[in-house]
Image (cartoon, helix red, strand yellow):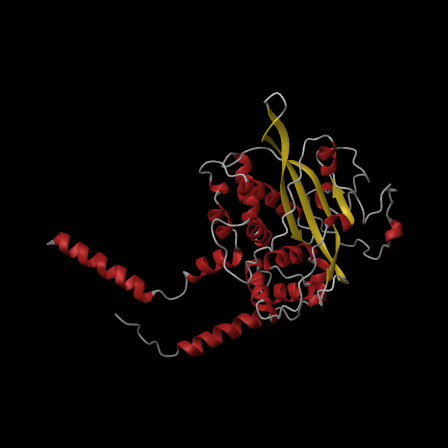
Amino acid sequence: MGYVAVKGGTKAIQASVRMYKDKQHAAGYEIEVEHIKANMNQLINQIMSEASLYDRDLAALSILQAEGNMEEAVFLLRAHRSTLPRLHYSTVTNTRDMFVERRVSASFKDIPGGQILGASPDFTHRLLDDDQSFAGNKTAEAYTEIPHTHALDALPKVIDYLEQEGLFSKKPEDDREPDDITKQSIEFPSSRSERLQSLTRGQTGAVTSLGYAEIRGYGYSSHPNIGEVRVGQQPVHIDPFDTGDAYYIGDIELTEVEAFMPADEDDMDDLGNTEKTFKIGYGLTFGQNETKAIAMSVLDYSLEHPVGDAATSDDEFVLLHIDSVESTGFISHLKLPHYVTFQSVLDRVRQTKGEHGQ
């Protein structure tokens, strides 16, 4: 069986594209990219994270072009990203150098430098507010400032508490070149660098759902303790001539999460008893994206310390199914013509029915 040519198909497709592009003009006004940047910061953060491209202007443009469809916006931004030349690699960055704008710990009340609530909807009432007349021109001096004992770009890590008490041991530094899943396909079993890249690029809802499933019992099933959530501006440097002299090129907003997980260490104490310590799950995303970063830390631990045949410990199951472009693309392709394959199935069904009828 071959495809049946349909006359007028090209014209119909072109007309469909024109209708789609004209829809945003139907109301008689247009939304500007600057309006999206000013009012949809959280949506921009999610799209930049899932597209793995930090550019607020392009993210806002993708939202406008996709009519607010997140999956389509991520697809557009990733497609654009694939066309960009890769001029330099940044040097290794340390989040201890982050200029912190928000920092909370659910594990300790009193932490060096103090809890910094910053800007967050966590403390608001979840009620629709039809009065959007809040003055947006307040300066930083209009808000109460809490004095800090540490510079905001040199805050210690909460995990230092556990290390000082001997309840957490750092792993030796791994200076191997990380695998880059944007340049070569991910391989299974995956390396941790591949897993962290996939998780931070994962669809926010999918990462959150699988992280929730992990906690509910479909994996390690332990309630994590969030040692620290920090949001702030992270400096980025490059060393274009590989001379050891790095140049500062700007800041990017990041959300970092370190989650504590109680675990039995393999090492024994002097009496031959298994020592009870903590291990860590790690999450890092572009922008202020706290729920995803927390879920990422849960899945990072689950994949790093697999439990039996749990789905959330299977790196292939988790990493392939959280990718929004892969999953959305495959599901969406089902609405495209499958005439030949369906007719083939239909012929087999008819043949089978005919044979049974005889």
The tally of labels here is 0
- Image coordinates for residue 242, horizontal then vertical, percent: 71, 65
Residue that appears at 13% across and 53% down: 357
Residue that appears at 39% across and 79% down: 8
Does residue 91 appear to the left or right of 196 in the view shown? right
- Image coordinates for residue 69, horizontal then vertical, percent: 57, 60
- Image coordinates for residue 36, horizontal then vertical, percent: 69, 62
Does residue 121 appear to the left or right of 265 in the view shown? right
Does residue 187 appear to the left or right of 81 in the view shown? left
Compared with 292, 336 (above or below) is below
Q: Nearer the viewer, residue 351 or 106?
A: 106
- Image coordinates for residue 329, horizontal then vertical, percent: 47, 60
Q: Nearer the viewer, residue 25 or 78?
A: 78
Where is residue 9, by image quadrant?
A: bottom left
Where is residue 139, by image quadrant?
A: bottom right
Compared with 46, 149 (above or below) is above
Quarter occupied by the N terminus = bottom left
Q: Nearer the viewer, residue 283 or 133?
A: 283
Quarter occupied by the C terminus = bottom left
Does residue 304 appear to the left or right of 351 in the view shown? right
The residue most toward the top is 271
